[in-house]
Amino acid sequence: MVVYSPHKVIIFGEHAVVHGYPALSATVDLFAKIYLIPSRSGLQYTPFVQRTLAYLGLKNIYVKVETNVPSGSGLGTSSMIIAGILMSERNYTKEQLANEAFNIEYETQGLGSPIDTSTISAGGFVLTNGNEGIPLWKIEKNGITWNFSSIPTRNMGLVVVYSGSKGSTREQVAKVRKFYERGSFAKDIMKRIGNITQEGVKAVTKGDNAKVGELMNENHSELKVFGISTEQIEKIVSIGREYGYGAKLTGAGGGGAVIIIPREKEKLLKKLKELNVMVFDTSTTSAGIFKRSE
């Protein structure tokens, strides 16, 4: 059996979601194929892969991941692989998979939210801690509760751009947490991001790309205050705003990827090519993780 695991983007609300505020995420039509292959050495150098195999009691197994998307891109690679390994060996409901994959990821990183594992498990647009959509499940950790719901709507075209440098989720989440714990300033920013998310859900549901893009721009500006953008990300965002409806970093930041809603796609792709960055012309998808025989 081969597991097909989707990458995901956060459209609104990264970092705020860690502290219980709303966020909107979606799976994108960029799937990895995950195989478990018998191996004499079974050597795995990634901590979350080691922990997942140990959780399943597997030894002498090599995890092969086929994807064009670099790790550390902010597109949910660790969650995608953890869920893929689990699903290779056992049968889960979507809720069970979201919970178990998050527990393993949290134990490895020591922080974070279950938005990635829930999005990859559910597929489509997933709202965290909002009032819209069809209820999915809730996950609790250290006194914080995340409620998930599915937002049924049409898929949205996206250009996903890898900035060329990896972002560390652990480092960036810890950095923002320090801001958050110092006082009300960061909490006010998180609240504004939460409000942007709620407004963004309505725009996504209506298929109003111009409004979605405008709100993405606002969300990015708020995130910049925490120092999680980079010079290269800002160059990409600037191009995205010129030839798209909106652009923002997606994921923890400090590197990683930018998402753009294209308006003049040919001009956008041509301009991005001049930056010598990795570009994925894709869209959201309603599909979540699945497995099938090959």
Image (cartoon, helix red, strand yellow):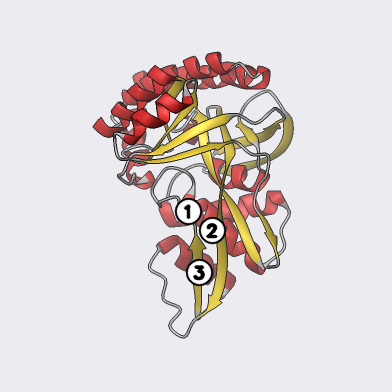
Is residue 148 left or right of 268 when viewed as pictured? right
Tell me the SS state at disc 1: helix
Q: What element carries label 2?
A: helix
User: Compared to 137, does 55 lie above or below?
Assistant: below
Residue 242's spot in the image, x, y percent? 38, 18
Residue 78 is marked as 1
Labels 1 and 2 touching (C-beta < 8 A): yes
Q: Can residue 187 be seen in this view?
A: no
Dot 1 or dot 3, earlier in sequence:
3
Q: Which residue is labeled 2 in the image?
A: 82
Q: Quadrant of residue 206?
A: top right
Q: How far apart are marks 1 and 3 (CA)?
A: 13 Å
- Residue type at mark 1: give it: Ser
Residue nearer the viewer, 96 or 46 = 46
Label at residue 63: 3
Secondary structure of residue under mark 3: strand
Closer to the camera: disc 2 or disc 3? Answer: 3
Give the class, few, some or many, for how many residues have Cα within 10 Å of label 3's Cα (few <14, many ≥20).
many
The first of marks 2 and 3 along the sequence is: 3
Q: Which amino acid does label 2 sit on?
A: Ile
> Percent from the top left, x then y, of residue 18?
48, 36
